[in-house]
């Protein structure tokens, strides 16, 4: 019966004889494991950040934009035609069973003034349901109401960036700000959202009732016109039905016949998020695969050194065979040496990979996320590399003729 602990002690003693060579042999595994963990950390971190940024837009979300990509053979670009109204948003919410909420959006840029402070930012004219559609709660204060929308009340909700830029340490609630020289009362502060998937600061915004924006801020050429309608489906499963219902309803309301191209575009943000997440996942696997090449190169280095070791220790192998060592005793000894080299290199590589990803995150500002699974996989893979690349030298050693081995100079 093979005595594994005894064989392991012999393998460790053999590796200690040539410490420098053993350390240099492990270097390839250390670099390989470290690279795999660092690359997977970068890919996972980027994937999580993209998912977080996209999900901050809202869940189960459809965006209806005026205009279509083509009209009569002419490329138009969505958003280029004033075809959507507040009435469309109200009809979508009323007549589409798969829709949970719908919010019109009329946006523009304006100079905001408070005292001697001023700030240029985006202003959203919308309805109270926008907070539900975008999953955007209030940090302080209250939202404006449907009555505020009907009365075109001059009230505003402000994002955190606007609050910090205009008010500093002053409490913003109930303060009067001027948007395009028109006084608005701040009634609520939005919860922090962070950056969007396009890198825009979502907290740098102000929301006012859509009627106020239409009548007092932006002055629309067409009554009731809005730039976008944001639609929230009741669930992820209802998203497809909601898209079909909204499309059918708007075609009916806009009197678009079966053969005509529709004058609006619907974008499914959840599908975009899923595609982006899949792309990020593929990128993570690609980075891991590229990094694993260095791990294989490290394994080849182990095999090379083990072949040299077999040649140098031919007489030792012959003596062991002469005193009764079996073929698998010899094989196990050299495989054990290769596995020990790989596993020690794997442990050091895991530490180096975690440290490297932290340094990379601090130095380059890249988001990284080290997962336990990645560390375990890299460590186990390093052990497999040791077994795979250590087998051939062990096999070669076990086939030596004891008499020839004892005569080897």
Image (cartoon, rainbow, N blue to C red):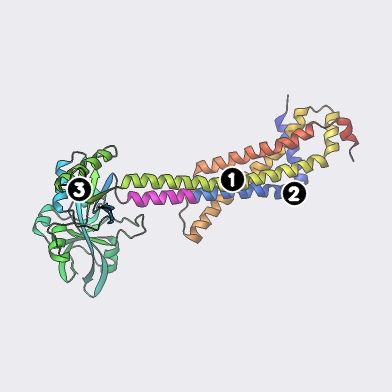
Q: Which SS class for mark 3?
A: strand
Label 2, residues with CA under 10 Å away: few <14, some 14-19, many ≥20:
few
Q: Are marks 3 and 1 in contact (CB under 8 Å)?
A: no
Give the x, y percent position of residue 42.
49, 51
Which circle marks residue 102 in the picture?
3
Q: Which of disc 1 and disc 3 is earlier in sequence? A: 3
Label 3, residues with CA under 10 Å away: few <14, some 14-19, many ≥20:
many
Does residue 110 lie above or below 276 as drawn?
below
Give the x, y percent position of residue 254.
15, 49
**Residue 44 is one of the magenta-drawn residues:** yes
Magenta-drawn segment: 42-59
Which circle marks residue 292 in the picture?
1
Give the x, y percent position of residue 70.
28, 52
Give the x, y percent position of residue 102.
20, 48
Query: 280 or 373, which is in the foreground?
Result: 280
Residue on which disc 2 sits: 21
Does residue 331 lie above or below 184 as drawn?
above
Mark nearest the camera among 2 and 3 is 3
Residue 350 seen anywhere in this rendered image of the structure: no
Image-quadrant location for residue 406 = top right
Q: Which SS class for mark 2?
A: helix
Q: Which SS class for mark 1?
A: helix
Residue 79 seen anywhere in this rendered image of the structure: yes
Quadrant where the N terminus sits is top right
Q: Residue furthest front?
A: 73
Label 1, residues with CA under 10 Å away: few <14, some 14-19, many ≥20:
many
Instruction: Compute the Cα span from label 2 to label 3.
Output: 69 Å
Instruction: Compute the Cα span from label 3 to label 1.
Output: 48 Å
């Amino acid at each position: 019966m093979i005595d594994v602990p005894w064989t392991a002690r012999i393998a460790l003693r053999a590796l200690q004889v040539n410490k420098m060579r053993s350390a240099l042999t492990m270097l390839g595994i250390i670099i390989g494991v470290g690279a795999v963990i660092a690359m997977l950390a970068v890919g996972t971190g980027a994937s999580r950040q993209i998912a977080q940024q996209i999900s901050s837009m809202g869940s189960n979300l459809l965006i209806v934009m005026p205009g279509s990509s083509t009209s009569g053979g002419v490329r138009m670009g969505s958003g280029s035609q004033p075809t959507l109204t507040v009435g469309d948003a109200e009809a979508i919410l009323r007549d589409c069973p798969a829709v949970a909420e719908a919010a019109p959006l009329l946006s523009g840029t304006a100079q905001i003034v408070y005292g001697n402070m001023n700030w240029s930012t985006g202003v959203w004219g919308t309805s109270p349901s926008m907070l539900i559609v975008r999953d955007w709660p209030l940090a302080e204060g209250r939202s404006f109401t449907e009555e505020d929308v009907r009365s075109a009340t001059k009230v505003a909700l402000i994002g955190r960036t606007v609050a910090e830029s205009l008010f500093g340490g002053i409490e913003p609630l109930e303060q009067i700000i001027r948007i395009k020289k028109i006084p608005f009362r701040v009634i609520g502060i939005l919860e922090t959202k962070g950056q969007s998937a396009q890198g825009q600061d979502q907290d740098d915004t102000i929301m006012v009732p859509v009627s106020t924006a239409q009548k007092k801020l932006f002055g629309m050429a067409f009554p009731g016109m809005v730039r976008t309608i944001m639609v929230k489906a009741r669930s992820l499963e209802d998203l497809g039905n909601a898209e079909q219902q909204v499309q059918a309803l708007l075609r009916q309301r806009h009197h678009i016949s079966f053969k005509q191209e529709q004058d609006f575009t619907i974008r499914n943000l959840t599908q975009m998020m899923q595609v982006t997440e899949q792309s990020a996942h593929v990128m993570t696997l690609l980075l891991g695969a590229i990094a694993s090449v260095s791990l294989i190169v490290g394994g080849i280095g182990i095999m090379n050194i083990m072949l040299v070791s077999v040649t140098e220790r031919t007489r030792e192998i012959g003596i062991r065979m002469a005193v009764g060592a079996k073929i698998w005793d010899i094989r196990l000894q050299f495989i054990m040496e290769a596995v020990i080299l790989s596993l020690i290199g794997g442990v050091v590589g895991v530490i180096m990979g975690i440290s490297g990803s932290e340094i990379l995150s601090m130095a380059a500002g890249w988001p990284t996320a080290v997962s336990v699974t990645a560390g375990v996989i890299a460590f186990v893979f390093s052990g497999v590399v040791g077994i795979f690349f250590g087998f051939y030298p062990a096999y070669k050693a076990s086939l030596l003729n004891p008499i020839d081995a004892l005569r080897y100079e």
